[in-house]
Amino acid sequence: MPDLYFEDIRPGEVYELGTRTVTEEELITFAREWDPQPFHVDPEAAKESVFGGLIASGWQTGAIWMRMYVDTMLGSAARGSPGIEELRWLAPVRPGDTLTGRLTVLDATPSSTRPDRGTIRIRGEMVNQEGVTVMAMTSRGHFGRRT
Protein backbone atom coordinates (compact mmCIF):
# COMPACT_ATOMS: atom_id res chain seq x y z
CA MET A 1 0.00 0.00 0.00
CA PRO A 2 1.36 3.41 -0.87
CA ASP A 3 1.30 6.30 1.55
CA LEU A 4 -0.81 8.63 -0.54
CA TYR A 5 -1.46 11.93 1.12
CA PHE A 6 -4.12 14.45 0.19
CA GLU A 7 -1.53 16.48 -1.76
CA ASP A 8 -0.68 13.43 -3.92
CA ILE A 9 -4.22 12.98 -5.22
CA ARG A 10 -5.29 15.31 -8.02
CA PRO A 11 -8.61 15.80 -9.82
CA GLY A 12 -8.65 13.98 -13.15
CA GLU A 13 -6.22 11.26 -12.08
CA VAL A 14 -7.28 7.71 -12.85
CA TYR A 15 -6.07 4.78 -10.77
CA GLU A 16 -6.33 1.22 -12.04
CA LEU A 17 -7.14 -0.95 -9.04
CA GLY A 18 -6.49 -4.44 -10.40
CA THR A 19 -8.51 -7.39 -11.64
CA ARG A 20 -10.26 -10.38 -10.18
CA THR A 21 -12.12 -13.30 -11.72
CA VAL A 22 -15.32 -14.23 -9.88
CA THR A 23 -15.92 -17.96 -9.45
CA GLU A 24 -19.31 -19.61 -9.10
CA GLU A 25 -18.27 -21.03 -5.74
CA GLU A 26 -17.34 -17.66 -4.22
CA LEU A 27 -20.44 -16.04 -5.73
CA ILE A 28 -22.73 -18.59 -4.05
CA THR A 29 -20.77 -18.57 -0.78
CA PHE A 30 -21.03 -14.78 -0.48
CA ALA A 31 -24.71 -14.76 -1.39
CA ARG A 32 -25.66 -17.55 1.04
CA GLU A 33 -24.25 -15.41 3.86
CA TRP A 34 -25.24 -11.89 2.77
CA ASP A 35 -27.84 -11.86 -0.06
CA PRO A 36 -29.56 -15.26 -0.34
CA GLN A 37 -31.89 -14.52 -3.23
CA PRO A 38 -32.50 -17.50 -5.56
CA PHE A 39 -30.70 -15.96 -8.56
CA HIS A 40 -27.58 -15.62 -6.40
CA VAL A 41 -27.54 -19.02 -4.66
CA ASP A 42 -29.42 -21.56 -6.81
CA PRO A 43 -28.20 -22.15 -10.39
CA GLU A 44 -31.43 -23.93 -11.39
CA ALA A 45 -33.73 -21.25 -9.96
CA ALA A 46 -31.50 -18.59 -11.50
CA LYS A 47 -32.12 -20.04 -14.98
CA GLU A 48 -35.83 -19.27 -14.51
CA SER A 49 -35.19 -15.72 -13.26
CA VAL A 50 -35.15 -12.52 -15.30
CA PHE A 51 -31.34 -12.90 -15.40
CA GLY A 52 -31.43 -16.31 -17.11
CA GLY A 53 -28.66 -17.63 -14.89
CA LEU A 54 -26.65 -17.18 -11.73
CA ILE A 55 -25.40 -13.64 -10.98
CA ALA A 56 -23.34 -12.07 -8.21
CA SER A 57 -24.90 -9.92 -5.55
CA GLY A 58 -24.29 -6.26 -6.23
CA TRP A 59 -23.00 -6.05 -2.67
CA GLN A 60 -20.33 -8.61 -3.55
CA THR A 61 -19.30 -6.55 -6.57
CA GLY A 62 -18.99 -3.53 -4.28
CA ALA A 63 -17.00 -5.53 -1.73
CA ILE A 64 -14.56 -6.70 -4.43
CA TRP A 65 -14.11 -3.08 -5.59
CA MET A 66 -13.51 -1.99 -1.98
CA ARG A 67 -10.79 -4.62 -1.52
CA MET A 68 -9.09 -3.46 -4.71
CA TYR A 69 -9.31 0.15 -3.47
CA VAL A 70 -7.83 -0.66 -0.08
CA ASP A 71 -4.98 -2.68 -1.61
CA THR A 72 -4.13 0.04 -4.13
CA MET A 73 -4.89 3.39 -2.48
CA LEU A 74 -4.99 3.23 1.25
CA GLY A 75 -2.00 3.64 3.53
CA SER A 76 -1.36 5.46 6.76
CA ALA A 77 -2.81 8.75 5.43
CA ALA A 78 -6.33 7.32 4.96
CA ARG A 79 -8.83 8.83 7.38
CA GLY A 80 -12.06 7.00 6.57
CA SER A 81 -15.08 8.02 4.53
CA PRO A 82 -18.30 9.92 5.15
CA GLY A 83 -20.05 7.56 2.74
CA ILE A 84 -21.26 6.76 -0.73
CA GLU A 85 -23.30 9.38 -2.55
CA GLU A 86 -24.50 7.16 -5.38
CA LEU A 87 -24.20 3.46 -6.20
CA ARG A 88 -25.46 1.76 -9.35
CA TRP A 89 -25.33 -1.87 -10.43
CA LEU A 90 -25.50 -1.46 -14.20
CA ALA A 91 -25.10 -5.02 -15.52
CA PRO A 92 -25.06 -8.48 -13.96
CA VAL A 93 -21.81 -10.12 -12.91
CA ARG A 94 -21.72 -13.80 -13.81
CA PRO A 95 -19.49 -16.67 -12.73
CA GLY A 96 -16.22 -16.52 -14.65
CA ASP A 97 -16.36 -12.77 -15.25
CA THR A 98 -13.07 -10.95 -14.81
CA LEU A 99 -13.62 -7.59 -13.18
CA THR A 100 -11.30 -4.59 -13.33
CA GLY A 101 -11.59 -1.79 -10.77
CA ARG A 102 -10.99 1.83 -11.62
CA LEU A 103 -11.07 5.07 -9.64
CA THR A 104 -11.24 8.56 -11.10
CA VAL A 105 -10.63 11.55 -8.82
CA LEU A 106 -13.41 14.09 -9.36
CA ASP A 107 -12.29 16.74 -6.91
CA ALA A 108 -10.07 17.32 -3.89
CA THR A 109 -10.99 19.81 -1.19
CA PRO A 110 -8.84 20.79 1.79
CA SER A 111 -10.80 20.79 5.06
CA SER A 112 -11.80 24.26 6.21
CA THR A 113 -11.98 23.15 9.85
CA ARG A 114 -9.24 20.51 10.09
CA PRO A 115 -6.01 21.61 8.40
CA ASP A 116 -4.47 18.16 8.83
CA ARG A 117 -6.76 16.60 6.19
CA GLY A 118 -8.72 16.96 2.99
CA THR A 119 -11.54 15.16 1.21
CA ILE A 120 -11.48 13.60 -2.22
CA ARG A 121 -14.60 12.79 -4.23
CA ILE A 122 -14.25 9.89 -6.61
CA ARG A 123 -16.05 7.89 -9.24
CA GLY A 124 -15.46 4.20 -8.72
CA GLU A 125 -16.15 1.72 -11.49
CA MET A 126 -16.05 -2.00 -12.02
CA VAL A 127 -15.75 -3.17 -15.64
CA ASN A 128 -16.03 -6.73 -16.93
CA GLN A 129 -13.82 -8.48 -19.50
CA GLU A 130 -16.05 -7.23 -22.34
CA GLY A 131 -15.58 -3.59 -21.32
CA VAL A 132 -19.08 -3.30 -19.85
CA THR A 133 -19.32 -1.17 -16.72
CA VAL A 134 -21.15 -3.38 -14.22
CA MET A 135 -20.96 -1.03 -11.22
CA ALA A 136 -20.46 2.71 -10.78
CA MET A 137 -20.43 4.84 -7.67
CA THR A 138 -19.57 8.27 -6.39
CA SER A 139 -18.12 8.56 -2.90
CA ARG A 140 -15.84 10.61 -0.68
CA GLY A 141 -12.76 9.75 1.34
CA HIS A 142 -10.67 11.66 3.84
CA PHE A 143 -6.88 11.72 3.53
CA GLY A 144 -4.29 13.22 5.85
CA ARG A 145 -2.08 16.07 4.68
CA ARG A 146 1.67 16.21 4.94
CA THR A 147 2.89 18.18 7.94
Image (cartoon, grey):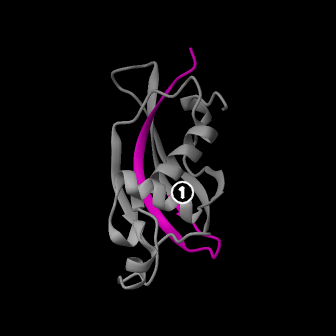
Tell me which amino acid carries mark 1: Glu
Name the residue beneath numbered marker 1.
Answer: 26
Inspect the magenta stretch and tell me whether residue 80 lies in it: no
Of the pair 59 and 123, the residue shown nearer to us: 59
Residue furthest out toward the top:
147
Q: Is residue 89 left or right of residue 25?
A: left
Q: Which residues are magenta?
A: 125-147
In the rendered image, residue 135, in percent from the top left (x then y), is placed at 46, 64
Seen in the image, is 137 located left or right of residue 78? left
Q: Position of residue 144 (x, y in %)?
A: 50, 24
User: Height in image: 23 above or below 116?
Assistant: below
Residue 51 seen in render: yes
Which of the image's four quarters has the N terminus?
top right
Judge whether residue 126 is colored magenta: yes
Q: Residues within 10 Å of mark 1 (few under 14, many from 20)?
A: few
Please give the count of numbered marks on the rendered protein: 1
Q: Is residue 67 above or below residue 18?
A: above
**Residue 103, percent across and down?**
56, 52
Look at 56% across and 14% down and name the residue there.
147
Name the chief secondary structure element in magenta. strand
* Quadrant in which residue 131 is drawn: bottom right
